[in-house]
Amino acid sequence: MEIDYDEYLPMCDKFDMTPEQKCQFITELHNIMECFVDLGFGTDPSSLAAPELAEFVSEFVRKGDAVKQSQ
């Protein structure tokens, strides 16, 4: 997915960074967000390589959420 830096650069105006550093920051933040989306939809490499592991982790997280809600 292509990043529209013109859309996000104004949000970095408060930071004491060069334009190149701002673009790098936006790129890294975009990569982090993309990883979370991949994890959420099960399209990350670990989920594709070992679907049973991804299912186990999802079940573990659901159980943890149930425990937190019951407290």
Image: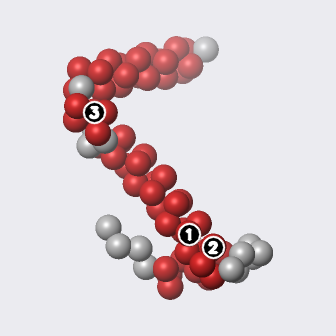
Element on which disc 1 rests: helix
Compare residues 70 and 26 and report the one nearer the observer: 26
Closer to us: 64 or 7: 7
Spatial separation of the CA atoms under disc 3 and disc 2: 32 Å
Q: In front of the other: label 3 or label 2?
A: 2
Query: x, y percentage for residue 14?
Result: 75, 76
Q: Is residue 39 visible?
A: yes
Horizontal side of 21 relative to 54 (left or right) equals right
- Provide residue 71's location: percent of width, then percent of height: 61, 14
Does the CB distance between marks 2 and 1 fall below 8 Å? yes
Mark 2, secondary structure of its residue: helix
**Which residue is depicted at the point 32% across and 18% down?**
56
Q: Residues within 10 Å of mark 2 (few under 14, many from 20)?
A: few
Q: Mark 2 highlights which residue? A: 21
Residue under label 1:
24
User: Which amino acid, mark 1?
Assistant: Gln
Q: Name the residue under label 3.
A: 47
Residue 55 visible within the image: no
Q: Which colour scheme is used?
A: secondary structure
Q: What residue type is labelled 2?
A: Gln
Provide the secondary structure element on which disc 3 rests.
Answer: helix
- Is residue 15 positioned above or below 64 on the image? below
Q: Please count the marks in the image.
A: 3
For residue 21, side relative to residue 66 (left or right): right
Up the image or down, 42 lies above or below 65; here it is below
Mark 3 and mark 1 residues within 8 Å of each other at the beta carbon: no
| Occupied quadrant, residue 11 | bottom right
Residue 7: x and y in percent read 50, 81
Residue 55 falls in image quadrant: top left
On-image quarter of the N terminus: bottom left
Q: Is residue 49 left or right of residue 33?
A: left
Q: Say whether disc 3 or disc 1 marks the residue closer to the N-terminus.
A: 1
